[in-house]
Image (cartoon, rainbow, N blue to C red):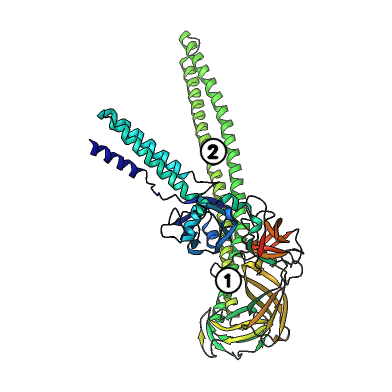
Amino acid sequence: MKHRCFVWVILLLALTVPVVVNAAPMTQPLGSASVTLTLNPDPPSTGTAHAVVVVSGAPAAALSKTSLSFSSAMPSMNMVGAGGSATRVAAGRYAFDLPLGMAATWSITIRATGGVSGTTTFVVPVASSAGGSAAAQAMSGMAGASGGGDVGPWRTAAFVLLVIVIVLAVVSRRARTPWALTILGVAAAVAIAVAALQVHVDAQPGSMNGMDMNAMSDVKGDAPVTVRTVAVATVGGSADPDVFAPGTLAPYLLQDIVARSPGLLQDFSIYAGDHVKAGQVLAHLDEPELVARAGASSADALAQSRAADAAAIDAASRAPATIVAGQAGAAAAQLEAEGAVADLAAKEERRRYWSVELAREQTLLNEGAVSAQEFQDERAQAAAADADATMAMHRVHASQAQVRAARAKVVDASASAQIARATAESMHAQAERAAQGARIDAIMAGYATVVAPMDGIVLKRLVDPGTYVQAGTVIARVAVVDRLRVQANIAEGDLSGISVGTPISARTSDGITLHGRVSSVAPVADPSTRTAAVEAIVDNPGRHAVPGGYVRVIVAARSAVPRNAMQVPSAAVVRGTEDPAVWRVVDGSVERVPVRVVSDDGHAAYIMGDLHSGDRIVIDGATDLQTGARVAEASS
């Protein structure tokens, strides 16, 4: 049982040994993005740490333009460490090696310029490495000391005793052995003795662990911070805003002369360098078929036009007469039909009369008032009246049919007239198409003569005389060189002061200077060269400047820097939660001067504020300064 208890004690002592756990990467905001810092080893110890910085939360285009720099310091001792530029290893990923010579709390400042701008500071505790130098080990003890002694040994002893008490309580409760209290007392005595011995060693006069770091931090005046400074100068309004760039000359207009119809090229006698005028005959195309086709088309168009006119006359005269005749026949038939209806009405009335009279005679015959002969005469007259009424009805039907036929003739005559007019219109359309074809053939026949489209100079003759060419064949190239186009690629950083109308001059290699104004600025820069095309139209009197040659272009750009602005290195501007500022050195100490940043390209910044030409400002080590801090200048 005793052996088991000793095993428990050994295990508990092993559990109290500190275990180093890798800390998570540190992430902080950086301007509009965020930055993550990872150190290797992690947690860091004295020596050289490899730092990896990842910038995220920004567009890829902005990250590709971002540059990173770093600086380090020990605020507790008011000392400046290493600094420099970080190496880009991928888009948004940077790396650098950082010497950490002492075990203390270090501040690592990351500064981004370009696509992403901002500054952030990481506070990193640095432990003493096992294989570190004696100075590093001593500074580790200094970093851990506070006041007259270190409470670390006592804290460790108390933790060990607490763990031993808990375990022995559990063991003694199960085993119910009296030696548990003995073991507890021995362990407590050992822990207290070790803690007291450690405190005694730390308190020795020659020990670095006995030093008070707070006391060292208070004597800033005795240890001034070494910083690099530079004098500022007023540049706004006095700096030359002209932009210089190489360029080329191109003709104002360049046009190919083409054969617009097929034919044999004749009378073609121009050569490269000849000057031509607009409308000047340059050559002829021999193609007899074009003239013959134009004559035939013209004759056909005339014949079709005459036929269309005849059809229009027929439609306007004979067709209306047919309609009038049909309308007259329809009116006569209508009158005849109306007479037949009236006659039918009279005959029907006579038939009714004799029908009634025959019935009365039948009654009288039955009564013996009339003779049979008289009754037979009456019945014969009634039959005749009935026959007349029937015939009158047939005549009405016949006359109505004649009316319908006459009206149908009128409709047919109207339709015939419309057809005649439509035929005449169709013939006129065909005649117009024929006339258009004749005009096209006449134009094509006119293309047999090749003329110059503009005033210019012949650059090249592409076809020899006597060659049969097709329509669209390029036979010569003409350019306008009295005016020229100056074309230059301007860096994107210089485009802000250039717009349409900006004065520009171009100087050739033989000393000819051409003047003009910017006529166009490309709205998009070339991502591979970071330049944009700028073009201007210049006069070339006497045609002394030759198109195609290189020129030195000078653009009188507007200055983007206001008057009285100051130019300083970008690293001098401190950006944080407060407004941008610089640290000005006055009589060996620094003061914070708020500024307004006019422009900043990552290398140089133009600022405005309460500064004067000749003032010295801090450009390295400015991040951790405080107002009134003593500094030692290392001028640059």
Element marked by disc 1: helix
- Position of the N terminus, as image quadrant, is top left
Residue 39 at x, y percent in the picture: 46, 56
Q: Nearer the viewer, residue 108 or 357?
A: 108
Crowd tier of the residue under label 1, counting other residues whose Cα lies within 10 Å: few below 14, some 14–19, many 20 or above = many
Among the 4 quarters of the image, the one containing residue 12:
top left
Q: Nearer the viewer, residue 161 or 281?
A: 161
Residue 574 at x, y percent in the picture: 64, 57
Q: Is residue 196 above or below residue 568?
A: above
Q: Is residue 394 visible?
A: yes
| Residue at image mark 1 | 301
Residue 184 at x, y percent in the picture: 34, 35
Number of marks in the image? 2
Among the 4 quarters of the image, the one containing residue 461:
bottom right
Q: Is residue 357 above or below residue 419?
A: above
Q: Nearer the viewer, residue 347 or 338?
A: 338
- Disc 2/disc 1 C-alpha distance (Å): 52 Å
**Mark 2 belongs to which amino acid?**
Ser
Tell me what residue is drawn at x 58 percent, y 48 percent. Answer: 326
Among the 4 quarters of the image, the one containing residue 73:
bottom right
The tag earlier along the polypeptide, 2 or 1, is 1
**Mark 1 belongs to which amino acid?**
Ala
| Residue at image mark 2 | 399
Residue 110 at x, y percent in the picture: 55, 57
Q: Tell me, yes or no, whether the two marked residues, 2 and 1, touch with CB atoms within 8 Å.
A: no
Q: Nearer the viewer, residue 288 or 458?
A: 458
Crowd tier of the residue under label 2, counting other residues whose Cα lies within 10 Å: few below 14, some 14–19, many 20 or above = many
Q: Is residue 502 above or below residue 391?
A: below
